[in-house]
Amino acid sequence: MPKVSVIIPTYNRSYLIKDAMDSVLKQSYSDFEIIIVDDGSTDDTSKVIQSIKDERIRYFYKENGGLSITRNFALGKTGGEYIAFLDDDDIWPEDYLGKMVSALEENLEYGVAYSLFKNYHPDGSVEDGFLRNRFISGYMTIRYYKKTPCLLPSATIFRKSVCENVWFDEALKNYEDQDYLLRISAKTKFLFVIDTCVKRRVTPGSLSKDKLSYNALLVFERFYFHLGGEKLIPRKTAHKKISEHYRGLARIHYKEGNRKAAVELLKKAVRFYPYYWKNYRGLLKALLLSSKTDKLSGWQMPEPLPNEITVNGEMTLTNINRL
């Protein structure tokens, strides 16, 4: 069995997939398998993949179902002691696997290792993925409810043991990465590896453009109230974080003149964290908006996520007890 199972999900990325694959095949560390799952591509992605001859490549084609379903399909095919994800538009440096595996083998108390990453834009500009002070080692769960840690799936490697019975939620169409990592964080400590850096290519669709996405808020609420988060996170910390998400969404609606949405979201913000004066100021300003010009007068509060994770079309409970 190979030491590392590298998972590359792909969909209609024939113009990018070869670069991602080459960055794995050129690794100085060679004890790996590459599991490529094509999520029903309609371009010549399969032709590009099959043109690369290497016995470590395992290629699967399935009907289109979305990123979470594709990753779960791949997780079911892994045989390695470690699991590494690589998105089809990202690139690893040649030393990536070697340094990440070595870091975990030298630090047995950690179940996950993660590295720096930089965003490479089409115009040639390059920027750090996040501020350097967000990169730390230790338990990450509480960090999500303070300042979100800098975790990118393509820059993260897992012991397979910590991934057992933890799946991507197929009901989520965005923020599924952070939902998965948040649930993993409840099982183990994360190790930051400073001396390697992943190249994240910013392409259409690689960064969410949906500013009104509620998934982050719903993920934080579900984890805290229904997946055992209350055992790990102080009540005040969790409620403050959730309140901040409601206020942030309300701010967007306020700027667009959506009175009903802004008011209802700010009421939620106040309910969760009544100690913050900006919640009240925002609510007062939203109440002064005209209901006659409200473009979303029929707006409704988003439904909460199911209390369970959806896998293979079925809901399953997730055990978050730490190892």
Image: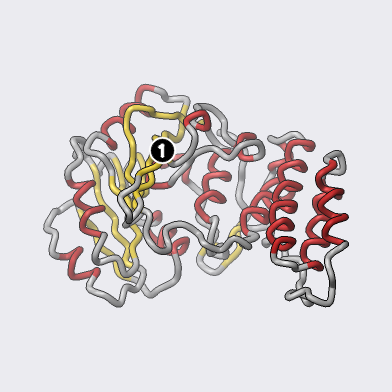
Q: Is residue 185 left or right of residue 297?
A: left
Q: Secondary structure at mark 1?
A: strand
Q: Tell which of 223 and 280 is nearer to you.
A: 280
What residue is shown at x 30% (from left), y 69% (from top)?
A: 61
Q: Amino acid at mark 1?
A: Arg
What residue is shown at x 44% (from left), y 45% (from top)?
A: 152
Going by the picture, which residue comes out furthest to the top? 106
Placement of the C terminus among the 4 image quadrants: top right
Q: Quadrant of residue 254?
A: bottom right
Placement of the N terminus among the 4 image quadrants: top left
What residue is shown at x 72% (from left), y 66% (from top)?
A: 302
Q: Quadrant of residue 183?
A: top right
Neighbour tally class for label 1: few under 14, some 14-19, many 20 plus, Cα within 10 Å: many
Q: Which residue is mark 1?
A: 159
Image location (x, y in percent) of residue 275: 86, 39
Count of residue discs = 1
Image location (x, y in percent) of residue 105: 35, 26
What residue is shown at x 52% (from left), y 62% (from top)?
A: 209
Q: Is residue 265 left or right of residue 167?
A: right
Image location (x, y in percent) of residue 94: 22, 38
Q: Is residue 1 left or right of residue 305?
A: left
The image shows residue 277, relative to residue 293, as above or below, that is above
- Asked if residue 96 can be seen in this view, the reply is yes
